[in-house]
Image (cartoon, helix red, strand yellow):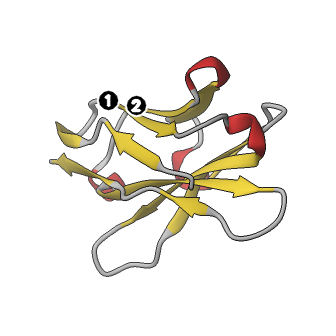
């Protein structure tokens, strides 16, 4: 059984920063890639950032230059550093672990609220 636990969300003013963490039970080497998603109220869930096992990264256009995804294999943890936060970044942020085959594993999510 795989468990993902996110933390680091909270309330922050526009222009501020937060760092989200996602701890994966067991080794993250098992996974082909790790993703951060977010879901804003009344909107569909969207992919925010993606990092492969080899370290290649991709970002949604809306967060490029502001967000950075990284991982610490020794700690089985994936991070999302979020800078210059905007009110539009408000939402529930979830991490997902993508195995080579089969469905992704998901965490429960952490709330990020950016106030103006």
The residue depicted at 37 percent of the width and 59 percent of the height is: 108
- Circle 2 packing at 10 Å, graded few (<14), some (14-19), many (20+), is some
Decide if residue 116 is on the left or right side of residue 59. Answer: left
Q: Nearer the viewer, residue 18 or 110?
A: 110
Q: Secondary structure at mark 1?
A: loop
**35, above or below 53, in the image:** below
Q: Nearer the viewer, residue 71 or 50?
A: 71
| Secondary element at tag 2 | loop
Give x and y (percent) for residue 89.
35, 53
Residue positioned 40% across, 31% down in the render: 83
Residue 83's tag is 2
The part of the image, by quadrant, that contains residue 12 is: top left
Q: How many marks?
A: 2
Q: Residues within 10 Å of mark 1 (few under 14, many from 20)?
A: some
The residues bearing labels 2 and 1 have C-alpha atoms spaced at a distance of 4 Å
**In the displayed structure, does residue 82 sit left or right of residue 13?**
right
Q: Quadrant of residue 92?
A: bottom left
x, y percent for residue 78: 55, 34
Would residue 78 be found to the left or right of residue 93 on screen?
A: right
Q: Position of residue 22 (x, y in %)?
A: 46, 39
Q: Identify whether 92 is placed above or below 34.
A: below
Residue 94, image x, y percentages: 44, 55
């Amino acid at each position: 059984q795989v468990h993902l636990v996110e933390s680091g969300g909270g309330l922050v003013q526009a222009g501020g920063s937060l760092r989200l963490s996602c701890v994966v039970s067991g080794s993250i080497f098992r996974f082909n890639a790790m993703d951060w998603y977010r879901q804003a109220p009344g909107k569909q869930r969207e992919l925010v950032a993606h990092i492969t096992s080899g370290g290649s990264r991709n970002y949604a256009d809306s967060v490029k230059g502001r967000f950075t995804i990284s991982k610490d294999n020794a700690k089985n943890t994936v991070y999302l550093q979020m800078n210059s936060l905007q009110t539009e970044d408000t939402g529930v942020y979830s991490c997902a672990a993508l195995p080579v085959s089969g469905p992704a594993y998901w965490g429960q999510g952490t709330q990020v609220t950016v106030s103006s």
